[in-house]
Amino acid sequence: MNSDFYLLLAGGVGAAKFIEGLVNVVNPELLKIIVNTGDDIDLFGLKICPDLDIITYTLSNFIDKEKGWGFAEETFNCLSILKKFYNAGWFNAGDKDLAIHIYRTDLYSQGFSKAEITAKICKSFGVKSQIIPMSNEPVETYIKTPTESMHFEKYYIKYQCKPEILGVEFKGIKEAKPVKGVLEYINKAKRIIICPSNPIVSIETILQVKGIKDSLSKVKKKVYAISPIIKGTTVKGPADKLMKSLGLEVSCVGVANFYKNIIGHFIIDNKDCKLKPEIEKLGIRTYCYDTLMTSIEKKIQLAQFIINLS
Ligand code: GDP
């Protein structure tokens, strides 16, 4: 196997922003992207893979750039009727989105694996990068709250991350194996990049798949991560709340500590640069840059900065 490719670990929206910049700097055919599937959920009798879809729609240019998820120019007619039958109307499945979920569910019933289905969708959409689910086996992230333990999507969308978090559980993770070839990709990749994603419910899910954390720890010198935490807070989503509930320090130092056994390089925001010496004490080479990706130019600049690091 040729070693000129980049391997990425990705969640949804934060990762997609970075990857949108990266494909302007690196040939998209040289990217292999391992995507979290802990957010996957069965609703309306359909198989839904939110993070895989966000990355796929981004790389095929179908994404709603403002929202960061779903198709652009989407309508919600089907959902308005589904709501009459199901109690899951809180999940904003658009009409075009539902077409993907129907196709995926159909292929599942024919016996195709998640990785095969993802590859077929990518091919139909003209995606040049290889998008790989973290595992073919089902894993579901549950958030324990004072009133109930609920699927992460329900916590995120229906309850808007408001309930207190008492714990996180990755159901099915013990049975989850990496997709064929992934451990070899970890060994062979020119560089591995952990995207700015939720460290707990996007990246840790991938890391807990059998063999992945161990394999990364052996090649950590070529592993780069971008902090999703800037000045002690998230850009979006509940990463700060989740980190706090697990007793981690909510800062880029907390993220560095969380990743310290698997990374050799860490990119933190300029606003946190005073924390660089503290992170370097962990044996991690640390770089400061403007990591807030508010425009396509800034996404490209961040990607270029990381690719140029030696
Ligand atoms: P999703 O948003 O739920 O799909 O989850 P992700 O796993 O993609 O994680 C979102 C994480 O990315 C959050 O912790 C955000 O703070 C982080 N993030 C989002 N946008 C940016 C950005 O522009 N810069 C940086 N550094 N982090 C970001």
Image (cartoon, grey):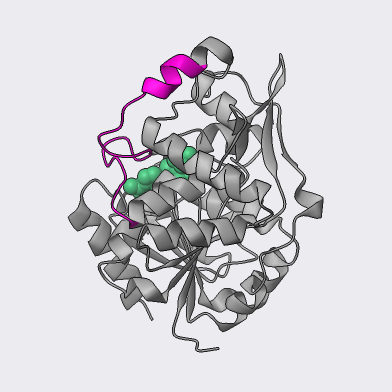
Say which quadrant the N terminus sits in: bottom right
Q: Is residue 79 above or below residue 232?
A: above
- What is the magenta segment's predominant secondary structure? loop
Q: Is residue 155 left or right of residue 122?
A: right
Q: Nearer the viewer, residue 252 or 50?
A: 50
Q: Please say if 192 is above or below 274.
A: below
From the viewer's side, name the closer residue of 139 and 200. 139
- Front-most of residues 64 and 122: 122
Q: Who is closer to the viewer here, 194 or 76?
A: 76
Residue 272 drawn in magenta = no
Task: Decide: is 148 above or below 307.
Answer: above
Q: Is residue 130 visible?
A: yes
Disc tally is 0
Residue at the spot x=29%, y=69% of the render? 305
Q: Is 81 covered by the magenta stretch?
A: yes
Q: Can residue 50 be seen here?
A: no
Expressed as whole percent of the image width and height from the top left, the position of residue 22 reads 32, 65
Which residue does the image show at 46% across and 43% down from the upper left? 100
Counting from the top left corner in percent of width and height, residue 83 is at 50, 14
The magenta-colored residue range is: 60-82
- Where on the image, by quarter, is ligand 1? top left
Figure check: 298 above or below 146: below
- Give the residue at the far top of this rendering: 84
